[in-house]
Amino acid sequence: MSEAATSGQGLSWRAACGIAVLVLTLSMIAMAQANYHADDPQANQVLSGSAFGYADLPGRQVLVPVETALARGMKNFRKAVAEPGRVVDLTYAGAQHGAEAEAGQLPNRFTDMPGAVFAASQGVEPGSDVLVATEAFLAEREVLAVTPATGEQACGDEARQGLLQRIGREIVWCREVAGLSDGGRLSLARFVTHGRDELVVLAYNGPGGKAAYLEYPGSADPGGTWRLDDGGEFSLEAYRPLFAFRGPGGVELAVRWSGPEGDALDLYRQADDSFTPFVAATWARPE
């Protein structure tokens, strides 16, 4: 009887400790969400109420590859925003620890990665990138669809003149990238080289003549100017706006930028006439 009682007390003590740890973890996450670092987009994964993830190959589940402690605190993340601006309901399925790949094999992008797993209410494009968010995050925003431009369309006069006035350098090329469902247009321009300094700028020209800009400076290097082994060229094919929001401060834009070293996912938000990093994630490209 004494041994059984001792064993039962031990189990109760472990359960109480486990609950205390869980409560403490969730409390820390809640505090962090209320005080996320506006100048640290990597830290804003999950803590901002949003995080980048991707779908499995059947397109029925979504993984947000984050640390286990953060993954366990994502039970209130119930939405996914997918390209070009589609919102899908999610159900939290739990946190997975990931697993080591077998010898000689590359790790599976979905099952071998630690993070939060969600079941999608509707199919999403297999392997596609999404932004997982809380309902509170989306309640403050209007989702804007992004439609990629077809072919090599030169940017309009308004975009070109705005870029020239802002940067004060000659434009090498200027291309229209996409249109937003609010009527705005996205254009990308490369400017003449100053020594080793290169510059590409994304311009958003919205309704009523409102504009915002995102600068991508680079330095000419044999290993790559903007991305690894890019040969000094900014690839339009590798740069893709996914979807956008009309947020509290203006337009917020989700972009995927691919390179041999992997994919960079960024959510930028408008601050006056500039875009600044808000949420960011990187991961290796699937083989």
Image: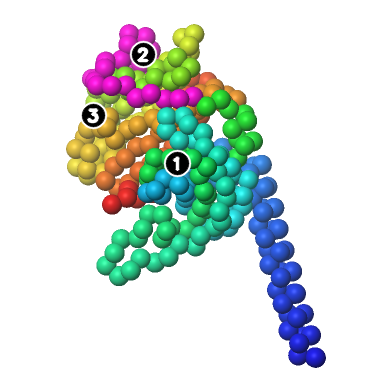
Residue 238 sits in which quadrant? top left
User: Residue 267, can we see it?
Assistant: no
Cα separation between marks 1 and 2: 37 Å
Residue 168: give its label.
none
Q: Magenta stretch containing residue 77, yes or no?
A: no
Cα separation between marks 3 and 2: 26 Å
**Which residue is drawn at the image coordinates 43% and 20% (left, top)?**
180
Q: Nearer the viewer, residue 155 or 55?
A: 55
| SS at circle 3 | loop
**Which residue is drawn at the image coordinates 68% and 67% (left, top)?**
18
Left or right position of 140 against 125: right
**Which residue is drawn at the image coordinates 28% and 52% (left, top)?**
287
Which stretch did the figure color magenta? 144-173
| SS at circle 2 | helix
Residue 159: give its label.
2
Q: Give the mark nearest the N terminus, 3 or 1.
A: 1
Query: Do the residues under discs 1 and 2 have CB atoms within 8 angstroms?
Result: no
Residue 99 sits in which quadrant? bottom left
The amino acid at mark 2 is Ala
**Which residue is drawn at the image coordinates 55% and 54% (left, top)?**
93
The spot of residue 130 in percent (x, y) is: 45, 40
The amino acid at mark 3 is Gly
The spot of residue 8 in percent (x, y) is: 75, 81
The spot of residue 100 in percent (x, y) is: 39, 67
The crowding category of the residue bearing disc 1, from other C-alpha atoms within 10 Å (few below 14, some 14 to 19, many at least 20), is: few
Looking at the image, is mark 1 or mark 2 nearer the viewer?
1
Q: Magenta stretch containing residue 161, yes or no?
A: yes
Residue 123: give its label.
1
The crowding category of the residue bearing disc 2, from other C-alpha atoms within 10 Å (few below 14, some 14 to 19, many at least 20), is: many
**Quarter of the image where the N terminus is located:** bottom right
Q: Which residue is mark 3?
A: 195
The spot of residue 227 in percent (x, y) is: 28, 40
